[in-house]
């Protein structure tokens, strides 16, 4: 019924009541929504990604790391794309550097 009323007004040359001055408010709300989304979602993700890249670039022998799968180990050797981590005793794993997510050196208690 409402659509029919709007069509009749358009044919008569009158503009619909809701179309007057509403366009600028829509653009302001749309820009505000994108600004909020940038501040609360995109910016923190970019910051976290940069910190992770910096962590992976600064890996060196002796660092205590955790993999994505939850394996704890100590770096034995680092190359451009891979790292060899010592897991337990003589057990060593060759892993991709992208699977290393954090350094747990500060998490271990001091003895």
Image (cartoon, rainbow, N blue to C red):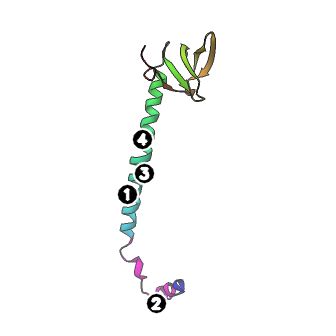
Q: Earlier in the sequence, mark 1 or mark 3?
A: 1
Q: Earlier in the sequence, mark 4 or mark 3?
A: 3
Of badges 1 and 2, the one in the foreground is 1
Residue lying at the far front in this picture: please name it: 111
Residue 47, how many percent across, how many down?
42, 36
Look at mark 3 in the image and give the residue it sits on. Answer: 37
Say if 1 sits above or below 72 in the image.
Answer: below
Residue 46, how many percent across, how many down?
44, 38
Disc 1 versus disc 3: distance between alpha carbons?
Answer: 9 Å
Look at mark 4 in the image and give the residue it sits on. Answer: 44
Look at mark 2 in the image and give the residue it sits on. Answer: 12
Q: Secondary structure at mark 2?
A: helix
The stretch in magenta equals 5-22
Q: Are marks 4 and 3 in contact (CB under 8 Å)?
A: no
Residue 20, how many percent across, how many down?
37, 77
Badge 2 density bin: few <14, some 14–19, many ≥20, Cα 10 Å:
few
Q: Are marks 1 and 3 in contact (CB under 8 Å)?
A: no
């Amino acid at each position: 019924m409402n659509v029919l009323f709007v069509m009749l007004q358009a044919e008569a040359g009158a503009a619909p009541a809701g179309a007057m001055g509403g366009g600028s408010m829509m653009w302001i709300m749309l820009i505000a929504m994108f600004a909020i989304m940038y501040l609360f979602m995109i910016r923190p993700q970019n910051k976290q990604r940069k910190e992770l890249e910096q962590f992976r670039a600064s890996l060196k022998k002796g660092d205590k790391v955790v993999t994505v799968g939850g394996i704890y180990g100590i770096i034995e050797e680092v190359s451009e794309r891979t790292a060899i981590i010592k897991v337990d005793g003589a057990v060593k794993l060759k892993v991709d550097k992208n699977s290393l997510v954090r350094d747990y050196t500060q998490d271990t208690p001091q003895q």
